[in-house]
Amino acid sequence: TEDGVSLVKKFLSTEVGLDTTAFNYADGSGVSSYNLVSVSIEIDLLKYIYEHKNLYNLFLECLPAGGIDLREDSFSESAKGKVFAKPGSITGVSSLAGYVKSRDNEVYAFSIIMSGFVKSSLIYQNIQNKIVELIVNFSRNKLTG
């Protein structure tokens, strides 16, 4: 409803500090072609959630886990339990956003949005999965990396 959208925008503006003119939130369904967001807005929101541990822990429970209930067959064994993300797609758009733990167990927020294609979104989902796998296998430690 309009009231719900208004409340969400108010929270995102006053609590999270997002510029609500930088995105368009038409409804909560997630499938409206009028919902428009950038990866930087999504990252800012994911960082806010991460910095508020109670919210982060609750949010993490709501996200599908890579290799378990998120694109089950698309991630390697090493990604199981390390990717927590929400996929999204509408015609010509495929996205994946959430958190990933690296080889060193560092948590990274990520957002990938691919748009403007006419072929199957599966191609782009596979690319997104490969990007996430690179983060899973990333290490700052030169001895393990």
Image (cartoon, rainbow, N blue to C red):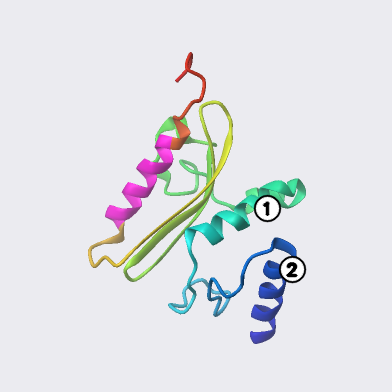
**Residue 38 x/y as whole percent:** 48, 63
Q: CA distance from mark 1 to mark 2?
A: 14 Å
Q: Residue 98 location in percent, x, y?
A: 54, 50
Question: What residue sits 45% from the left and 36% below the top?
Answer: 135
Q: Nearer the viewer, residue 17 or 32?
A: 17
Span highlighted in magenta in the image? 122-134
Q: Point out the frontmost of discs 1 and 2.
A: 2
Residue 1 magenta: no
Q: From this viewpoint, which residue is outermost toward the left?
A: 119
User: Most prominent secondary structure in the magenta stretch?
Assistant: helix
Residue 113 position by quadrant: bottom left
Q: Residue furthest bottom?
A: 2
Bin the neighbour count of mark 2 within 10 Å (Cα to Cα): few under 14, some 14-19, many 20 and up. few
Position above or below: 9 against 137: below
Q: Which mark is residue 49?
A: 1
Amino acid type at circle 2 is: Thr
